[in-house]
Image (cartoon, rainbow, N blue to C red):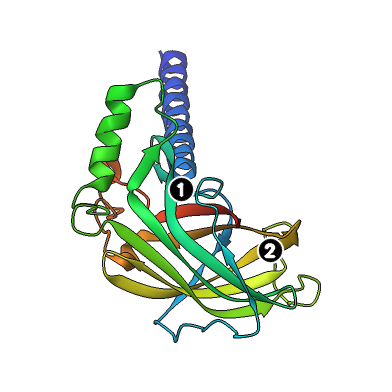
Amino acid sequence: MFGWATEHTWNKNHIMRTHIRLLFFMAILAAACQQAPKADKAEVTDVQAVKQPDENGHHHRLDTAASHLFWIGTKPTGEHKGSFRFSSGELHMKDSVLTSGQFVIDIRSLSNIDLATQPDMKKKLETELLGPNFFDAAQFPAARFEITEVQEFNPATAGKDVLLKDANYTIKGNLTIKDVSKNISFPAKIVRKDGKVMATADFNIDRTQWGMTYRADKSVQDKLINSIVNIRFEIVTK
């Protein structure tokens, strides 16, 4: 009798420990799914004065067909990837050094990538993101980025870790989305080759700072959409 009781208690405790480990594992898994891709974090401050082009510099117009802006949004059950197109833009260089520039992003060009084989789901997601809970493209069809400061960057002497490989500049600029403007700072790699300027960057920003707070409340796990969004752009001038 006592042997049975001991065995019963051991089985009960074993099952309880197994459940606890399973719940712990699921919690870790859920937390991992909520994380944005590993990238440099954009520093956000108040709007600053836009840097004007140098009169003695060179004007480089954006090749909108070859330039792309990619995004990744995450939630407990996974992630979605997509892109925007640029409607216009330009960079200004002096002595092969970037001095200023600005870009206009066509919000209505938002396109999902990962649901390409599920057209109904793809359309549903795009409609939701373009709607009033997120970008509200009907009222705010464009976003704008205007450079306010350019600093040459040397990872070896900068005193901080940067994830973007071969970053050679720190770019600061006013990002305007839905009539909300914030100054963001991020590392970038900018090179000039064959008369063209090519720029890349990969960083994370908090969408709630531009008024997109929908489903950002972490207390509602089953409806949570991560407030941190990954942005990666590849820019080429003509």
Element carrying mark 1: strand
Mark 1 nearby-residue class (10 Å; few <14, some 14–19, many ≥20): many
Element carrying mark 2: strand
Q: Quadrant of residue 164?
A: bottom right
Which residue is tagged 1?
71
Give the numbered dot on residue 190: 2
Q: In which quarter of the image is residue 154?
A: bottom right
On the image, the x and y values in percent for residue 130 come to 26, 47
Q: Is residue 32 at all visible to an observer of this figure?
A: yes
Q: Is residue 227 at all visible to an observer of this figure?
A: no
State the residue in front, 207 or 150.
Answer: 150
Select label 1 or label 2 by which is in front. 2
Q: In which quarter of the image is residue 159?
A: bottom right
On the image, the x and y values in percent for residue 86 come to 44, 54
Disc 2 marks a residue whose amino acid type is Ile
Q: In this view, does 228 lie above or below 7?
A: below
Give the numbered dot on residue 137: none
State the residue in front, 231 or 11.
Answer: 231
Q: In this view, does 157 lie above or below 201?
A: below
The quadrant in which the C terminus is found is bottom right
At a point 48% along the width and 63% down the height, the residue shown is 89
Mark 2 nearby-residue class (10 Å; few <14, some 14–19, many ≥20): some
